[in-house]
Image (tube, rainbow, N blue to C red):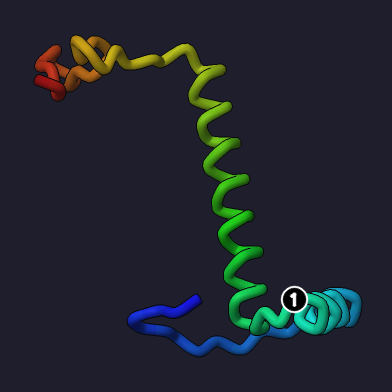
Amino acid sequence: MTYDTTQRITASLPPHLATFIDDYQQRTGTSKSEIIALGLRALQEQLLAQEYAEYARSGEFVDLETGDGLETGEGEKLWR
């Protein structure tokens, strides 16, 4: 995994998570940065899934064909 730009951060982890990263790194040859990036992507996907589920439960659906459900407060459609 390579990135055009990176940002260095410092994080403190409980021993069991640090050990997990070390073990996973030895088994797979994946860098610690890649392992942490994989975990953060999984967290992003989980949060997005939760947001979609909340949206589905809200009943506020948008018809992507007609744009129904995308109006401003004045009734003007946002989707054309």
**Helix, strand or loop for disc 1:** helix
Give the quarter of the image for residue 42: bottom right
Local crowd at mark 1 within 10 Å, few (<14), some, or many (≥20)? Answer: few
The mark tally for this picture is 1
Residue 47 higher or lower than 60, as above or below:
below
Residue 32 shown left or right of residue 37 in the figure: right
Residue 40 % position (x, y): 60, 63
* The C terminus, quarter of image: top left
x, y (%) of residue 10? 61, 89
The residue located at (50%, 89%) in the rendering is 8
Question: Image check: 74 left or right of 36?
Answer: left
Quadrant of residue 35 within the rendered picture: bottom right
Q: Is residue 18 above or below residue 63?
A: below
Between 46 and 57, the residue placed more toward the observer is 46
Q: Which residue is mark 1?
A: 28
Which residue appears at 57% of the width and 37% of the height? 49
Residue 38 is left or right of residue 12, and the answer is left
Find residue 28 and report its horizontal and vertical position in percent.
75, 76
Up-down: is 74 above or below 3? above
**Nearer the observer, 7 or 22:** 22
Residue type, numbered disc 1: Thr
The vertical placement of 51 against 41, above or below, is above
Question: For this view, does 45 lie left or right of residue 76?
Answer: right
